[in-house]
Every structure is written in C-alpha cells, then in structure tokens.
Amino acid sequence: MTQSLTPTEHVILNMGPQHPSTHGVLRLQLELEGEVVVGCRPIIGYLHRGIEKMAEARTYPQVLPYTDRLDYLSSSSNNMAYVQAVEKLLGVEAPERAQYLRVISLELNRIASHLVFVATFANDLAATTVFLYGIREREMIMDLFEMWAGARLTQSWIRIGGVAQDIPDGFVDQAREFCRLLPKRLEEYDRILTGNRIFRARTEGVGILPPDLGLDYGASGPTLRGSGVAFDIRRSEPYEAYPALDFEIATQPTCDCLGRYLVRMEEMRQSVRIIEQCLDRLPEGEVTAKVGRTIRPPAGEAYGRVESPRGEFGCYVVSDGSPQPVRVRFRAPSFFHLGVLPQMVQGWKVGDVVAILGSIDIVLGEVDR
Amino acid sequence: MNPSLYQRLVTWCAGWGLPAWFFDAVWMVAMAAMVTVFVLVTVLVLVWVERKISADMQSRVGPNRVGGRFGPLQTVADTIKLLLKEDIFPSGADRVVFWLAPFVVFVPTLMVFMVLPFSGKWMVADLNLGVLFVVAVSAFPVIGLIMAGWSSNNKYAILGAMRAAAQGLSYEIPLVLSMVCVVVAAGSLRLGDIVSAQSGGRWFILRFPLQLAFLLYFITAMAEVNRVPFDLPEAESELVSGYHVEYSGMRFAFYFLSEFAHLFFVSAFCATLFLGAWEGPWLPPAVWFLVKSYAIVILIMWIRWTVPRLRIDQVMGFAWKLLVPLGLIAVLLTGLMKVRGLG
C-alpha cells in the first residue's frame, strides 16, 4: 500500500529564528507529516553583520577584533586563520615561544567550545544537569583566558607576528591544574550521559552522514571525523607548533550523532595532552616578531587555514600593498554543515532534528558573518 | 472528615431550623476550600523544593533572596508576577476553548485530592469506588490539553497536544493495570479498605507480585505527570513548551499549578496504594503520609534532573511493548497469589 487511506496535508513548521535549540538565530523550515520530517530548508542571514565588507575599510590590525565575532565560541581559531593569512603575505613567522602559546590558546579554546557542545547537546536532549556541568568546566578556561587577554570570549590575543603579551605569573600552574582536573570531569560526563541508555537510544544510528556525502558537501572537523574520515588540518597541513606535538586524530566509524559526540569527547582528551606537552616544552624568548608599526603587506593573496573546533576554518586575504586589505573572505565550517543538514534530518522526527542539529554543532556567528 | 463531627454539626444546624441540604452545601464548599488551600500550599512548597533540589544537583545555589537566605518566598513572588501580567489571547485563537482549557486541566486535578486518605480521620470522601474515581477523573485533563493545543492556533501547541493525547492514553493502560493488582490484593476499590489491608506493616510494596505493580505504577505515573524522560508534550528544547506555549500570566500559572498538584497527587496515591498510607510509628498519621508522599516526589524529581528525554516512538513502544504485557503479567500473578491465599 503506497497511498494512505486518509489524505493528509504536510505541515510547514518554522523552527526558529527564536527557538531554544537552534543555537542562535537560525530558522529551519520543516515540512512535517505528523511528526516525521519530509523536508527541511535552513534559512540563514539573521545574524549578518557585514564583517567581510567592514574589513575592507579597516587596517590589518583593526580587522582582527572582528574575527572574534565570527565563531564566538572559539575566537582564537578565527584570529589564527586571519593572522596566518596576513603572516603569509608579510613573509613573517612568529617566534617559537609565541607558536607554543598560540597552540595552547587554540587547544584551550577547542576544549571550551567542545564543552559548550556537550552542554548544549545534552540540553537539547533534556539532560539539563549536564548542561550546567559543561558550563562549569568551561568557566575554568574562561578564567585562564581572562588572565592572559583580559577578555573571556573575544580574546584577540593572537596578533599579527605573535601574541599580544607574554603569559602572566601563575598561568602555567593554573593551566596544569585544569589539565589534571578535566579528564576526571570527562569521566563524570561518561557516567551520567555517554553510558545512559536513553541517551544512546536518542543518538545511536540517528542522523547518518555517509562519509562520501560529507566530503561532497565540504564537511570537515568532528562532523566529518564522526563519519570515519581522519581529516585534520593540524595533521595534514600543520601550522605553528603542531608538527612537534604528539596527538591522535579521533574518529568514529558510526556516522551518527553518537559518533560525532564521541569524537568531540576524545578530542578534549587529546587537547589536554597537547596542552600538557606545550606547557612542558614552552621555550623562552620573545613573543612577537618585528612587523613594524604600519602593516603593509606586499600585493598578493594568501589563504590561512586552521582546524577550528567545528572544522576547517579558512581566511582568504587579498592585498594591494596598502594598509587596508582589498578583500577578506572567511570559510566557515558551520555553513557547509548546515548545507548537508537537510539530507541528514530527512525521515527523522522533530525530536531528532534537534539532536542532529545539536550534533553538528553550528555557530551562527560564522555562518552569517 | 470525622463523620461524628459531621453528624453533630448536622444536628446542630437542624436545631437552628436550617434544612440539611443547606448544611450540605456549606459543608461541601468548606471542604473544597480546604482542599484547594492545601493544594496551593503544597504546590508553593513543591516548586521551591524542586528549584532547590535541581540547583543542588547542578552545583548551583537556587533561590536565595526572597524571604531569607534560602529564598522560601521565591514562589510567592513569582506567583504575584504572573498575576500582574497582561492577559493575552493569541490572534486566531478560539477564544472560548482557549479560555476554558486551563480549567478543564485544573479542576479534575483538584478533584482527585478528595479521596486522598491523609489519615484515618482526614479524608474528604471515602468513596466505595475510590480507585475507579481516581482513574476516571485523572484521565480528564488530557481533554484540556488537546483543547489548549487546538485552540492556540500554534503548530508547536498542536504537536504538543497530539503527543499529550497519545502518551496520556497509552500510559493510562499500564497505570490502571498496576492499580488493578492492588485492588485485587486488597479486595476492594475503597481507599480506606486498601489502606487497612496494609495495616500492621504489611505494605503492598513488601508483598511479592506487587513490587512489579509498584514499578509499573511509578514509571507510568512519571509519564502521566509529563516529567523527564516522558516530558514530550512540553519538550522545551523541541516544542518550546508544547501545548501551553501560547499561554501567559495566570493562565500559564494554572497549567503549572496543575502539573505540580498532579505530581503531588500521583506520589501521594503511590504512598496510599503501596506504602501503607499514613501507617508509621511515633509520628502522627498525617505527617507520615506527607513524608511518604514527599519521598516519592523527590525520587521523581531526582530522575527528572538526571536523565535525557525519550523520543515519541520510543515512548509509545515502551508503553505498548513492555509496560502493558508486564501489567497483564502482574495482574495474573496477583490473581494467582490471591487464589492461593498467599497475597
């Protein structure tokens, strides 16, 4: 029997832009048959601020704080991609100490971002308590950021040619204390969430992203690694101090929400490993290379790419030799993940849409720019 | 209440030349007022307890300003705020049904409190069909939920109402089956008899096949009061807040009130059916009753703040594939035990 006895109409449900689980101002136009999703259209643009255009009217250092506002959960990755592109244009390399400090910053930010992921993902599945646990641990990272940058969220600590200033006294100890504490807290999450049968039932086999589909749509980061593709820019095109550091790329072959969750949990453990190595080997020396007061890169173009917590974050900068860039363009991983979302939610229920959307961990700040 | 007191008051009124029906009317209003006040106070306490417990579990502080260090008056302040809010009818709403729905949900929730045996003497009405009355009346609010969802002219609300209807009706069956076990064991539908069948510490939860019934009752009760993992009709992260998404101010407060009143009722009823109601040493019976009820309430809250939410098909599958067969087995076992005189 292919046809239902009673003809039913599909219901269009606008999920968002104001909705507790769309992680920002995203609107999903869902086409529902009862509770089952038969169509999904993500509608974006509610957070557009014209950052790329604004960058064309600012000097190179002035652009940097705007990049904080892209993926606001991992501002240092954004800083890094932009700085990397500008440094390529300038032909400058940061001093070794700055390179290690940058890696510490990037990895701390990765943990902070993944903690927010675990928190909000659990909250989407109504495990409210885990939400507050995740935020509690993130607070320790925020305190560390406050120590070195003065800001907690929008750091702009990674600067062209190095970092803003050297780490303050007591930072290393506090960072070590955090690295000691976090694995224990992650075990706590495993006990309350990962092993929970309801959590398993809600995530296992849900929202399948086949690896070839993910690659076709330009997915990257944990979303792609959750489908078993071991693609990580830290390994395939290493930058800063990464070549010297020992870490593993976490992958899961299951392609489902649980796989993406487990990849992020493992990445936090790997990030702790990386930070500990950096703290052990932190070389002495300067933290800024000499770049001059006015930054005038020679005419040309450059592309900086980093592994942000969400995937490949890229920044393309074109210079004409003036103190202002001609064009700055960002490649935001969330944008591509949002593109493949309609295929992932097809045939699942409204409750699963929330879980799947949570599992690809988008940030609308970088989608809309 | 105390029947002898009732008798004496009737005679006293007759002495003043007042007809019996007049006295009965006054008596009923007084009882209704007492139950209502009790429910309101209980809800005020429960909301505060829930906020404190959840805060404790989530390493937060919880209410800590209004009325002292532990914020005991926080709920009062919140209620005043809700009272002062603007009364909004959403555009396109079916005004009559929208207005009526909160009452259809609230009134039955209040009515079931009539049969709760707080102690041997404190009981508004010991109906000879007590259990049946509870089952019948507490199935009623589902209609109110559908009314709310339908009249709101909101897609989230209608989805929530659909879920509420499906879930409420499915879980009614194992719930009734678990009660049937108790009724069979006690040999009566009257709550007074059910309690006296458990007298002397022979609580039903301690007698063999009824542990299964207790488990069934506990799980289905959680589903009946829409608590996580069964909070699908509200599902904040999916349906924003489900069937009452368009309600604000005092109308919303009615849903909130019903929810917590119902939570207390299912816990108190659980204490009545399985934990020997007011039975216990040293303390007065009514205190024991409240202690047992609150213990169940806190257990439900504990679970609510620990586990994630199920999906609608999982919820339905759980009810029909597991709970209903288990309920039938429990009834069968109880019957066998009863026949062999072991129960």
Image: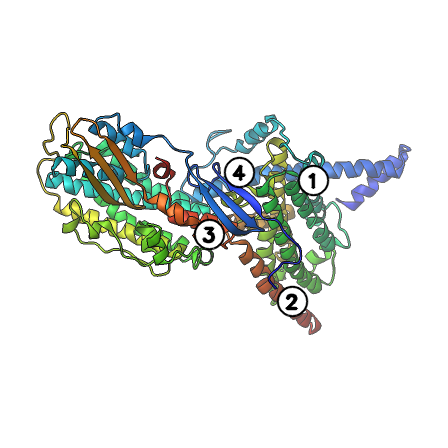
Amino acid carrying mark 2 in the image: Leu
Q: Which residue is mark 2?
A: B328
Marks 1 & 4, CB-CB < 8 Å contact: no
Instruction: Using the numbered discs, state the Cα–Cα distance from disc 3 to disc 1 in whole angstroms.
Output: 48 Å
The foreground one among B1 and A289 is A289
Q: Which residue is mark 4?
A: B48
The foreground one among B322 and A124 is A124
Amino acid carrying mark 1 in the image: Val
Q: Which residue is mark 3?
A: A345
Q: Which residue is mark 1?
A: B35
Q: In the displayed structure, would residue B141 be above or below residue A262?
A: above
Q: In the displayed structure, would residue B152 be above or below residue A214?
A: above
The residue sitting at the left extreme is: A285
In this rendering, the count of numbered labels is 4
The foreground one among A209 and A250 is A209
Q: Residues within 10 Å of mark 2 (few under 14, many from 20)?
A: some
Instruction: Using the numbered discs, state the Cα–Cα distance from disc 1 to disc 4 in whole angstroms.
Output: 20 Å
Q: From the viewer's perspective, is the residue at label 3 or at label 1 nearer?
A: 3
